Amino acid sequence: MTRPKSIRLFELFYLGSVLVGAINTAMTWAENAASAEAIQVRQMLGPWFLPLSTVFLYTLWLLLWYFTARQRSNVARWVVVVFYALALIGFVFTLAVGATPAGLPLALSAVSLVLTTVAVIFLFRRDAAEWFGKSA
């Protein structure tokens, strides 16, 4: 079966979200690394922990893309949905407590969340349901 339009669009928006997130991570790396929390983590777990955990997370997101868009994994689809829900809750919580970064990092976070929202919506269209082996 060829990949349906919804899955191709999921792929486009999801990978776009990952790219925007990576740009945001790179732009804010020095500032985040200088935070009190990051310093404490480095002291407890070593200087390699934060870079390694960042690589792990981006690898996980790319594996979820691969298994969802290329391997038809319904489990991966639902993991994407759960991670999206957690990101949405985290974003709203960050806004509510006033801990948001200013300017461009906040805008990039919002853009990434919007791209992920659109990507997740495409996972539940009729042709995507057929891709995952479900009747719509």
Image: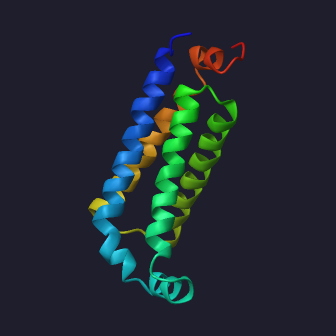
- Name the residue located 54 percent from the left edge and 50 percent from the top edge: 60
- Where does the image place residue 101, in percent across and percent down from the top left? 37, 69
Judged left or right of residue 86, residue 57 is: left
Percent coordinates x, y for residue 118 in the rendering? 47, 34
| Rendered position, 7 above or below 1 | below
Q: Quadrant of the N terminus?
A: top right
**Residue at image location 50% in from the left, 23% down from the top:** 7
**Nearer the observer, 129 or 100:** 129
- Say if residue 99 shows up in the picture: no
Residue at point 51% right, 66% down?
53
| Residue 27 shown left or right of residue 121 in the figure | left
Image coordinates of residue 68 in percent, x first then y, are 57, 32
Q: Which quadrant does the C terminus fall into?
A: top right
The location of residue 62, given as percent across then percent down, is 48, 43
Comparing 49 with 78, the one in front is 49
Is residue 46 rendered to the left or right of residue 72? left
Q: Is residue 31 above or below residue 115?
A: below
Residue 44 falls in which quadrant of the image? Answer: bottom right
